[in-house]
Image (cartoon, rainbow, N blue to C red):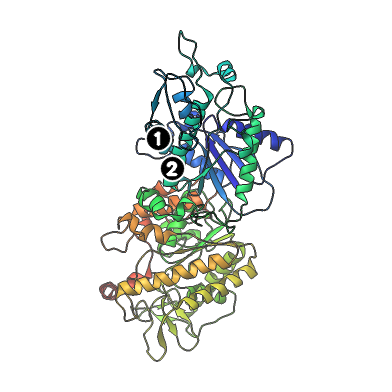
Amino acid sequence: MKIICIGNSHVGALSAAAIADWGSGRPHRFDLHVGRLGHAEYLPVVDPAGRINGTLARDIEDARAGRDSSRMHLVGTGTPGGPNRTVVVSMVGGNAHNLMGLIEPEPRFDFILAENPGLPLAEDADILPQGQVAAILDRAVQAEIAPILKALRAAAGTEIWHLESPPPIASNDHIAQYMEDRFRQEGKAPRVSAPSFRYKLWRLHSAAVRRLCGELGIRFVPHPAEAVDEQGFLLPQHVPANATHAAPSYGRLQLAQLDELMVADRDAPRQPGDTPYRDLPETAFWTRSVARVPADQVAPLNEFPFRIGANDKVATAGSCFAQHIARHLAQGGYNYYIAEQPHPALGQAVARDFGYGTFSARYANIYTSRQLLQLVQRAEGMFVPVTDVWDAPDGRSLVDPFRPAIQPGGYASAEEVRADRNRHLAAVRRMLREMDVFVFTLGLTEAWVDRRDGAVFPLCPGVSGGRFDPAIHDFLNLSIDDVRDDLDRTFRLLRAIRPDLRIILTVSPVPLKATASGDHVLAATTYSKSVLRVAAHDMAATHENVGYFPSYEIIAGNFNRGAYYAEDLREVRPEGVSHVMRTFFAHVVEGSAGSSAAADHRTIALPSARSGPSERDAARLECEEELLEFDRVMAARRNG
């Protein structure tokens, strides 16, 4: 459990109590990070566009990931146990009632508090309707607190609670003695307002903040009940050596309150009118996390189950879109792992042309879950397909049926195909044993199979080699059960080889180029992506150390109004890729080395142990699926 507490001066009591508790060996149940909004790097807290300060947003994200900073301090680590819960606790603002009425106003006024009409009224004061006084405080709350809470809600990505301001101090003498300079008037001895007047203003202020929190979906946490006397004033033991705050002992009560709230059973009986939605984070609500958020800041995920470290060997495979992740990891200085390296004689340009570095090994695009399963089985010697080699479209060379576009110009002989395939599968075996993180992008459900043994091809025979034979080749459109079973079997094989392997699943947002299902290509795309998305969810929900990253949702989501697709409605624009990668680095990648990688358009060397596809190649992802378009196939054959 984790609490990230940010606020103004009222945060002092809580942070002082926390430092004392952890320092004396009395930790609380949660990790506690504390940041004060008065820090120079957090100003202005909200920019003119209504967005939270960028440094503050990064510090909150770092705190969520368990990292400390010179501004957002880790006060202490909590005791084990309890739910996996992260809450941002706001102690923003909270002194508007004191600014309005700590000092007796001129001309004097008072009002009747509807919830406690028996409270005394000031003599010789104008008695105003409560609604007018409430309107003044509500306006102050809207100006002081609302912009910060709204911006925080858009950026925090988790639950937000707001703590009520401390109750007023009863003693006027104490207030007069410790009054802050901002309340003093030059040349005058300020007169402290009557306790009942100050109490009433505090109650109206709290009501205004409570209403604001209700509108924003933020949980309002009242003051600890045991901190006040029968009249509602702060008990003497919690009164500090100032006029408007509370002592560390009050902060200790707040910490105990947070302890209880953090582990509260959400299934416990609720009060009439309450619902299970009350405590949900901002990301559970469309308006708050999608409609009202700038399109380029929508991040459709909460906590990711693990983080990629700088030294983790990250292997990639899948459809075309997986290549973006490889490229940006390499640009960000992370360990994009290439198991299949070219001979140095090839040089970088030739190596790229022959598929080195596009993925972690030269398997080219792996569009389906069945392809991935069979690749692992072939690498481990568990499956040897009947189909061995195909004639190339030019009729003069040969291709590998399971990598038909990997060798420009084809192979000279069947022996050459087999030798290169053996080298490739050896590299895959090495990758399976050495990778720490495996990123797989699911692309399609449609495939062509060999009826004799079930071998799956990346392309229909006859498109980029071989000859289509209806007696041998069959069309297969994988069902949700097929994909789940394929992935489950694959993950079990991978974990048998690499027990601690972490797996990231994504779904390609690129629509089908063509379909053999008999459906309209748009309906076929919807079916395919829906099946893959559900299967990815189920795998992440049922397998440990498997996480789903929502690249599909970021690109295809209606919140961006189609802005991330090019004119052909298939190719993903660079702006969309940048959005995906910013979100990936913010939520999945450890540290800040890659935080700007999505916007970095440098060209990097390829291939090497820490290299990936260059930016020059980003404009044309390597996709054999493009060959499915008839005019391209015919042009390729004419030019052959």
Q: Is residue 75 left or right of residue 289?
A: right
Q: In the rendered structure, which amino acid carries the disc numbered 1?
A: Asp
Q: Residue at x 58, y 59 (%)?
A: 267
Q: Nearer the viewer, residue 74 or 133?
A: 133
Dot 2 lies on which element?
helix
Q: Nearer the viewer, residue 58 or 625?
A: 58
Q: Is residue 43 above or below residue 611?
A: above
Q: Which mark is residue 77?
A: none
Q: Residues within 10 Å of mark 1 (few under 14, many from 20)?
A: many
| Spot occupied by residue 454 in the image (x, y as percentages of width and height) | 49, 84
Total count of labels: 2
Q: Residue at x 69, y 47 (%)?
A: 79
Quickly name the residue at label 2: 211
Q: Which mark is residue 138?
A: 1
| Spot occupied by residue 57 in the image (x, y as percentages of width and height) | 47, 41
Disc 1/disc 2 C-alpha distance (Å): 9 Å
In which image quadrant can residue 623 be found? bottom left
| Spot occupied by residue 555 in the image (x, y as percentages of width and height) | 37, 58
